[in-house]
């Protein structure tokens, strides 16, 4: 009787069969890792083409070029003045326009501009959105008028005084306040007072006269005056002045330098 295969022979045969059965699969997996699948390759090529096409459209084509500039928000400045300083590169790719550079140039060369927003208006435009400074006070010098804004910045000189803007008179040449605080500090105080006036008083104010840090006087329409004193407690003084004017509508002089003890006099 022939002996059957030994255990070792069975094991060897089994291992040999297993090796032979796994070998093709292992080779397939190896190939899959080494070579991209056709679909993956097509997707990659499509993405490359899309990116290249987008770059060409933005930079190389005529589809997105600067053809017009639109300026808005100007009051004293003209759109032509703003656009001349902006120097937007006409015909350049819209995406390449240096908007930050344009903003910096406009701020530097046109101090009347308080803020400027340069925006791309696809597909062919650049928008210049301007906000101009508003004068709070005027300083007369040599027959001209220096405009001062709410931050005490002297930003422009004009030949004609804008309507409704009070004239600032700094009568402080012999004042100790000038030596102690300086003209710029007194100017800031005057602007501060102007900004805290009640609206109806602000409209009637013709002159803001400052002789020292704690001596600010308002000259109103109709010959009326208001002694404001220092710039401290402005909101309180504004409320007291409003009440005082209602209580004494025919008075010609009002004193709110000490808001807890206001006074009015004259007619």
Image (cartoon, rainbow, N blue to C red):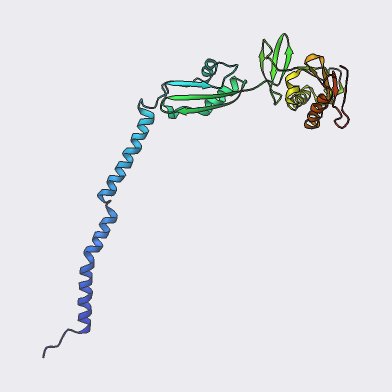
User: Residue pushed farthest top?
Assistant: 143
Residue at the image point whose x is 73% and y is 13% from the top? 140
Residue at the image point whose x is 70% and y is 25% from the top? 150
Vertical position of residue 134 compared to residue 22: above or below: above
In which quadrant is the C terminus drawn? top right
37 sits to left or right of 180? left
Residue 121 horizontal/vertical position (percent): 45, 27
Question: Quick one: 105 or 203, which is closer to the camera?
Answer: 203
User: Residue pushed farthest left?
Assistant: 1
Residue 66 horizontal/vertical position (percent): 42, 23
In which quadrant is the N terminus drawn? bottom left
Residue at the image point whose x is 49% and y is 21% from the top? 70
70 sits to left or right of 42? right
94 sits to left or right of 162? left
Question: Within the image, what quadrant is residue 250 found in?
Answer: top right
Vertical position of residue 146 compared to residue 10: above or below: above
Question: Within the image, what quadrant is residue 31 found in?
Answer: bottom left
Residue 15 horizontal/vertical position (percent): 23, 74
Residue 54 horizontal/vertical position (percent): 36, 34
Number of numbered labels in the structure image? 0
């Amino acid at each position: 009787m022939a002996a059957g295969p030994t255990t070792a022979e069975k094991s060897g045969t089994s291992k040999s069969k297993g090796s032979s059965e796994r070998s093709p699969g292992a080779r397939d997996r190896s190939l899959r890792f080494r070579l991209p699948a056709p679909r993956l390759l097509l997707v990659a090529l499509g993405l490359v083409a899309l990116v290249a096409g987008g770059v060409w459209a933005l930079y190389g084509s005529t589809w997105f070029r600067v053809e017009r500039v639109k300026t808005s928000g100007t009051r004293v400045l003209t759109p032509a003045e703003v656009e001349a300083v902006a120097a937007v590169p006409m015909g350049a790719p819209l995406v390449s326009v240096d908007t930050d550079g344009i903003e910096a140039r406009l701020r530097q060369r046109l101090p009347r501009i308080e803020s400027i927003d340069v925006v791309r208006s696809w597909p062919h435009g650049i928008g210049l959105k301007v906000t101009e400074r508003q004068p709070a006070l005027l300083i007369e010098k040599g027959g001209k008028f220096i405009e001062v804004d709410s931050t005490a910045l002297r930003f422009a000189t004009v030949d004609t005084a804008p309507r409704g803007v009070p004239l600032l008179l700094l009568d402080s040449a012999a004042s100790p306040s000038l030596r102690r605080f300086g003209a710029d500090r007194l100017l800031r105080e005057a602007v501060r007072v102007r900004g805290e006036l009640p609206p109806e008083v602000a409209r009637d104010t013709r002159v803001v006269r400052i002789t020292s840090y704690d001596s600010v006087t308002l000259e109103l329409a109709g010959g009326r005056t208001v002694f404001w004193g220092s710039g401290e407690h402005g909101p309180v003084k504004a409320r007291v002045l409003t009440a005082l004017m209602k209580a004494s509508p025919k008075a010609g002089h009002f004193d709110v330098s000490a808001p807890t003890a206001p006074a009015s006099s004259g007619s």
